[in-house]
Image (cartoon, rainbow, N blue to C red):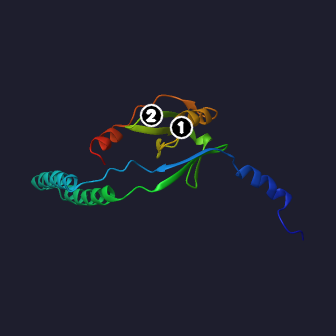
Amino acid sequence: MEEGIKESEVGDIIKSSSVVLYEWSASEYMHHEKTADWFFAAGIIAFGFLVLAIILKNALFVILLIVATFSIFILGNRPPRLVVFAITSRGFKIDNRLFPFSTLDHFWLNYDPPQTKELYIVSQKMLMPQITIPLGHTDPNEIREHLAKFLEEKEIEEPMSHIIARFLRF
């Protein structure tokens, strides 16, 4: 029996390997330091909705508000982690997760520093229709150059949730 890789396995390795064309790292989201005033305002808003839920006698709404408020306070204080993004010959890679180009539809670069520096990729999957990737300090023209080889560039409006989150400094 020979040691090493069998000839039939070589084809599988070649198919599964991909060449990294461009790579960068960025925070998973733009972090805004939250002051005590921010948490106080969020608490006042949550309390107002809690009063409304009690007036409406909606127990499910009360439970949802408690969970949502607790989650917002925890996530609002959590610092972002550093994520590695890559454009490869097979697809778009986020850390160790590969999104093959065959499952992606088109992309758009929303670049208006210092407010927005994001890449939007529209997926063909129903449960993940749009992927938002922060650009960090990378050059958007290089990303456009590499992605245009595989995907069509189509304008995508910034999601309203992103605009609201930026306004609320979340």
Question: Image height check: is 35 above or below 155?
Answer: below
Percent from the top left, x then y, of residue 92?
Answer: 58, 45
Identity of the residue drawn at 33% across and 57% down: 75
Farthest residue toward the bottom? 1
Q: Dividing the image into 4 quarters, which one contains the N terminus?
A: bottom right
Viewer-side label of 2, 1: 1
Farthest residue toward the right? 1
Examine the image and state in which quarter residue 59 appears: bottom left
Label 1 SS:
loop
Q: Earlier in the sequence, mark 2 or mark 1?
A: 2
Q: Nearer the viewer, residue 112 or 154?
A: 112
Identify the residue position indicated by label 1 in the image.
139
Percent from the top left, x then y, of residue 15?
Answer: 74, 49
Q: Which mark is residue 110?
A: 2
Q: Is residue 119 left or right of residue 2?
A: left
Q: Is residue 166 left or right of residue 54?
A: right
> Tag 2: residue type?
Asn
